[in-house]
Amino acid sequence: MSVHLHWFLPTGGDGRTLVDRHAYTDGGVKRSRIAPVSGVRAPDIDYLTQIAKAAEQLGFEAVLTPTGTWCEDAWLTTVALAQHTERLKFLVAFRPGVISPVLAAQMAATYQRITRGRLLLNVVTGGDSTEQRRFGDHLDHDRRYARTDEFLSVVRGVWSGQPFDFGGEHYQVEGGLTALPPDPLPEIFFGGSSAAAGPVAARHTDVYLTWGEPPEQVKQKIDWIRGLAEKEGRTVRFGIRLHTISRDSSADAWATANRLLDDLSPETVAAAQEALGRSESVGQQRMLALHGGSRDDLEISPNLWAGVGLVRGGAGTALVGSHSDVADRIEEYHALGVEHFVLSGYPHLEEAYWFGEGVIPDLAARGLLPRTPASPLTRPAVGGAPLLVAGGR
């Protein structure tokens, strides 16, 4: 089982601090800030292209694009970036409650033809009722997962290429059809830590994603989902969502983490924690429990730092250390059964290079990454993308 490495497209903004576009009290609409923020980068297509091309060159297989009020639309953004890349896949996040499942299946099929098979799907059920209501969705937490269950049943049904009927509580479809099904079928990534999420993952997902909890907690989740999937007669693979701060030395990496922490005022942290505390997401509450809103004891497991979660929703932990340290932790999660690693770092362009030039060669040397034949102008590459020969730094 090889490791699959993915990077992240910050379509909500990027910068040299943990406080990016989400630091604005209005989400960046009027640019009203909680505190002064320097070095904020707009998520324009030129900057996102830099990140996508870097990820492809460095050997990442795909990039995750988020979804939400403060992000650019993932479908439109990534299909544009596909025109600037050759092999990179796009893990497109979307909310099933705001789009017809038949239309989503059709969009996926079109996307696969336009990009020659470079689409992966990240189904985001949603854990914030306020956010959901912005899109006209008024279901509660558990009913949203029940709807996702039906949604994915319809998507897979209409991908058969034959007229498909479905009668459920949330969707009634007569003769649903994707005349030209996607080829290949996009893999479906899905996450959720609640009791309502587990059966949906077991029945439909190809890759179950968890946020970066300590290894023993990740193992518990893997065992839980694996057991549910076995009852459904299915096999599910596993992935993890983490940030990274990888440097030539452990001291340099931790100095970077401490600088990111020093940039956060108490008011910024308090405001973020208050907002995140209202989330209905069980996964988000598990993230908050890792640090309890305190700056103390943020290394919650060797090389696993919870500082990101003081201000950022969703993935709130980072692997911090030397390139070898970070590779050790990836190998540790991989031994538990984690195959896909969806990574990010601040800023995303620079951190892609730190990881790509430091950790990826280490993982390849350990035999955890597939290699592709080298051309006369490239050295041996990993993850399906050649690395150009260049001087070290």
Image: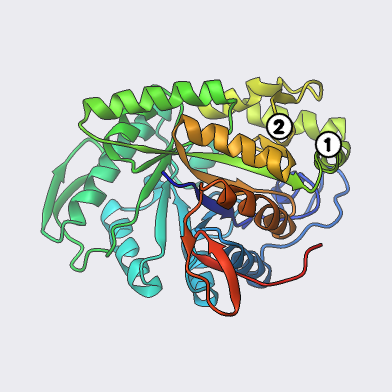
Residue 105 found in image quarter: bottom left
On the question of residue 196 being in view, the answer is: no
Q: Residues within 10 Å of mark 2 (few under 14, many from 20)?
A: many
Q: In the rendered view, does 270 fall on the left or right side of 379?
A: right
The local secondary structure at tag 2 comes to loop
Q: Position of residue 390 (x, y in %)?
A: 72, 71
2 or 1: tag closer to the N-terminus: 1
Residue 137 found in image quarter: top left
Locate the C terminus and report the quarter of the image it occupies: bottom right
Q: Is residue 99 placed above or below 380 in the rendered structure? A: above
Locate the N terminus and report the quarter of the image it occupies: top left
Q: Is residue 293 placed above or below 208 in the rendered structure? A: above
Q: Residues within 10 Å of mark 1 (few under 14, many from 20)?
A: some
Query: What residue is shown with label 1?
Result: 261
Q: Depth check: give the residue in front, 1 or 380.
A: 380
The residue sitting at 85% across, 43% down in the picture is 252
The local secondary structure at tag 1 comes to helix
Q: Amino acid at mark 2?
A: Asn
Q: Position of residue 369 (x, y in %)?
A: 50, 52
Q: Is label 2 or label 1 in front?
A: 2
Q: Depth check: give the residue in front, 67 or 250.
A: 250
The residue sitting at 74% across, 58% down in the picture is 350
Q: Is residue 313 placed above or below 48 in the rendered structure? A: above
Query: What residue is shown with label 2?
Result: 303
Q: Residue furthest bottom?
A: 376
Q: Is residue 371 placed above or below 171 in the rendered structure? A: below
Q: Depth check: give the residue in front, 292 or 144.
A: 292
Q: Which mark is residue 219?
A: none
Question: Mark 2 to mark 1: distance in Å?
Answer: 16 Å
Q: Position of residue 29 (x, y in %)?
A: 70, 55
Residue 7 found in image quarter: bottom right
